[in-house]
Amino acid sequence: MPARRVTKHGERVLKTPCPLVDFPALKSELPALLKDMWATMASARGVGLAAPQIGLSLRLAVIDVKPEGKSQRLVLINPVLLSSEGEQKKEEGCLSLPGVYAKLSRAARVRVRALDEHGEPWEMSGTGLLARAFQHEIDHLDGKLYIDRLPFEDRLKVLDVVKGVKPTWD
């Protein structure tokens, strides 16, 4: 399947919270959609991609952080952040804000519950990059970009870097 266009900062779908996925209704379309999402993420060299980033208001994301060089593809349908602890401050970017990076504090360890591509529930804890990816992609599903979590002054600096895009403030 072909890679899809990645939505960019300023597009409404990125600022709109996604409704829960009705798995039975999406089941027949899901394999093709996931192939498109994996292809899009790979072509953009990302570690995660949420459905709003390809223009779809679905509570669906994919993640592959490749811990220790091994692929660990995760499908998150209707994910919920169950718990978080600690803090890590690292540089973060987003496929919807290409070339724009900023240091952001996030929880160091999180636990997430979601459905997989077969509609089966799963839970997983993550630390480091996986914890950041879980939080980043769930933020997308809640209508938030990572820059929305930055202190105001830092957000203004980041938006100065984004050329030709009018910021949308909530």
Image (spheres, rainbow, N blue to C red):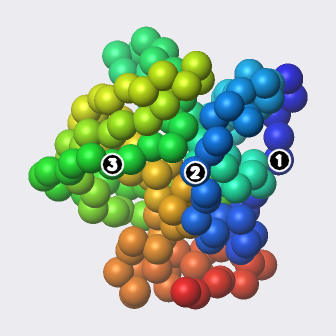
Of marks 2 and 3, which one's residue comes earlier in the chain?
Answer: 2
- Report which residue position mark 2 lands on: 20
Task: Identify the residue at the far right of this view.
Answer: 2
3D distance between C-alphas at marks 2 and 3: 14 Å
Q: Residues within 10 Å of mark 2 (few under 14, many from 20)?
A: some
Of marks 1 and 2, which one's residue comes earlier in the chain?
Answer: 1
- Report which residue position mark 3 lands on: 81
Type of amino acid at the residue the image marks with label 3: Leu
Tell me whether circle 1 and circle 2 mark residues in contact (CB < 8 Å). no
- Between 135 and 167, the residue placed more toward the observer is 135
Tell me whether circle 1 and circle 3 mark residues in contact (CB < 8 Å). no
- Between 81 and 166, the residue placed more toward the observer is 81
The C terminus - image quarter? bottom right
| Label 3 residue SS | strand
Q: Position of 54 compared to 153: left or right?
A: right
3D distance between C-alphas at marks 1 and 3: 28 Å
Type of amino acid at the residue the image marks with label 1: Arg
Say if residue 32 shows up in the picture. Answer: yes
The N terminus - image quarter? top right
- 145 over 134 or under it: above or below: below
- 72 over 152 or under it: above or below: above
Image coords of residue 50 (percent x, y): 61, 46
- Between 148 and 18, the residue placed more toward the observer is 18
Q: Which mark is residue 155?
A: none
Say if residue 133 shows up in the picture. Answer: no
Image coords of residue 74 (percent x, y): 49, 26
Q: Is label 2 or label 3 in front?
A: 2
Image coords of residue 134 (percent x, y): 40, 43
Q: Residues within 10 Å of mark 1 (few under 14, many from 20)?
A: few
Q: Which mark is residue 5?
A: 1
